[in-house]
Image: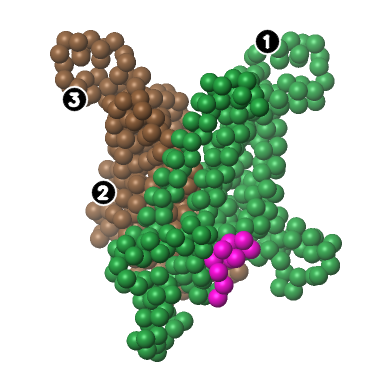
Chain colours: A brown, B green
Amino acid sequence: MRVLFGLAAGLLLLLAAQPLMPAYRSSRDVLAPPGRGHLLGTNDIGQDVLTGLLHATPNTVLMALAAAAVATAAALIVAGVAAAASATIRNMILRLVDALQVVPSILILLFIGTLMQPGLTGLAVLLGLTSWHEDVRVALAMLRRELQRENVRFARHMGASRTYCLRRHVLPAIRPALAALYLQNIRQVTLRAAGLAFLGLTDPRLLTWGGMMQDAMEHLYTPAWLWLLLPPAFALTAFLLIMLLLIENDPAGARA
Amino acid sequence: MTAGAIPISGRAWAAALLWGLTARFAVLMLVVLVIFILPRLLPGDPLGVMLSSDYTQNLSEAGLAELRARMGLAGGWAEQFGAWLSDLLRGDLGYSATHARPVATLIAESLPWTLLLILGAMPVYLVLAALAGIGAGRAAGGGFDRGLTGFVTVLASIPPFVTAILLMLGLAILWPVFPAGGALPMLPSDQLMIRTGQIARHVILPVTALALHEFARFYYLARGEAVVLAHRPFVMNAVARGLPPRRLLTEYYGRNILPIFIARLSDSVSGLVSAVVIIEIVFSYPGIGGLIYGAILDRDYTLLQGTTIAVAAGLLALNWLIDAAGTALAGRG
């Protein structure tokens, strides 16, 4: 979790430093191969690819962190409602959640993306609201396990309020598992956002790795794919890989 | 038949099925609502979008009104929704203006191509993942396991469209052994044998991309199970008896992994469809994904709506059937 806070802080810094970075502007060096002037070459309107990657990093990653936060929070809230509700209602919620999982979220995302081409905030909300249902079952299992433990029962018996128990007993206990869920959500959301950007269904002004790959698709038949396609593809894969390694090395276990 | 013999479990089974159906129907209604309401909340309407493109221009007021009525945009929201819903219930998904054909026909024409990709990839990744997973899992921590698991970890982090582009780049553009897109050449042969060969040549790259994407999921599953199985007494006993490795693989590991694979297969359908949509787009394959992408590019909302609802409904129905079959099988023991 600490890694993520560090990452978020670093990215915010990068975002704040964006005015200091060289601007991502077009120049006359069109489709220049990597070399001294442009370390990773330039694209078809003369924008420096390395600068583009740097500008796209906070957009891509912060959006994923925010969307995953929305998804995890929504899942936790629904799971909380289900845990507090009677068995019939809980069953109903779970059945609905199961049925929601059957519909591929990409269908809804493609539809909404076509209609409104969301920007940074829109994308975070949209992706968050289309991925929460995958975590409800896991979150509910965690919540119920913790709620039935004796420390919570004792506290309740001694007159502690529900909010107190939740804050002091339940949340600290499920925090590591929640962190693992959050990391998994980051991966999911990054994949979906990159797919949407790759199809040109995000705000065209929003520079992301997926969007850079879409621009590179026109150059598959020229040597320019080498420096237009590979850097954003590599950045995307590296980010997803780091997230996966974080999940796997988490001792608290993704096996919540 | 068996349900009659054990009335209680039979009734519970029916109740579970009914509940499942209700939940899936509710979700379908949610999808329908989202798809109906969202376009109407935004400034402008599908007609305006269509008119701003160059399909229809210089229409008179009367012509506009007629077009509006034909696209189901006349009257209030409730009226529109009622008309649209009753069309949907009759199986009428609307009429695509850009293709000049009913949406249902277009879907029926694209569906076989998507099924070809999915059914072509499924045996490949299931068998390979089972073999690789068992091989790695029964000697967990060994060189083969570490190498392969490392490779799969990287593979699992490559988005499906990146795999697809790299495959296309490598095997269709830089070293053109396979066609880069489509399902058939420009002028397909009318001889059955040659035509089948042409289809097979076009299907190889998209199927490989899809199989690579799904491989990781089932590899982890098979490996995890094989790690456990390798320490089970009946397997250790069989190894000590010197059972032929092939029998050990099929009868001991394979048989125990099969039910887990089948259970996971029905969960993985939604991810599979997401991947196939995006892979079809990269390879301009004429399946459902290609159809959706075409609708997006043309801003053909009728087609986009119809396809989205049809795919969602189809998947929900399929999932319900698998669920029912699974419950029935579990009930039998």
Q: Is residue B318 magenta?
A: no
- Determine which residue is flagged by label 2: A13
The residues tagged by marks 1 and 3 sit, at their Cα atoms, a distance apart of 49 Å
Tell me the SS state at disc 1.
Answer: helix
- For the residues beneath circles 2 and 1, the answer to whether they share a chain is no
Residue B233: assigned label? 1
Tell me the SS state at disc 2.
Answer: helix
Highlighted magenta segment, given as a residue range:
B100-109
Q: Is residue B103 magenta?
A: yes
Q: Tell me the residue at 42%/72% (across/down).
A: B71
Tell me the SS state at disc 3.
Answer: helix
Mark 1: amino acid: Pro
Mark 2: amino acid: Leu
Q: Dividing the picture into quarters, in which one does residue B101 lie?
A: bottom right
The residues tagged by marks 2 and 1 sit, at their Cα atoms, a distance apart of 56 Å
Q: Tell me the residue at 80%/60% (across/down).
A: B197
- For the residues beneath circles 2 and 3, the answer to whether they share a chain is yes
- Determine which residue is flagged by label 3: A163
Residue A174: assigned label? none
Would you say the residues marked 2 and 3 are in contact, meaning their CB atoms lie under 8 Å apart? no
- Dot 1: chain letter: B
Between A222 and B155, the one lying in front of the other is B155
Mark 3: amino acid: Thr
Callout 1 crowding tier (Cα within 10 Å): few <14, some 14–19, many ≥20: few
- Dot 2: chain letter: A
Q: How many marks?
A: 3
Q: Tell me the residue at 37%/41% (across/down).
A: A132
Residue B295, position in %: x, y?
50, 67
Asked if residue A14 lies left or right of residue B149, the reply is: left
Callout 2 crowding tier (Cα within 10 Å): few <14, some 14–19, many ≥20: few
Q: Tell me the residue at 43%/35% (across/down).
A: A95
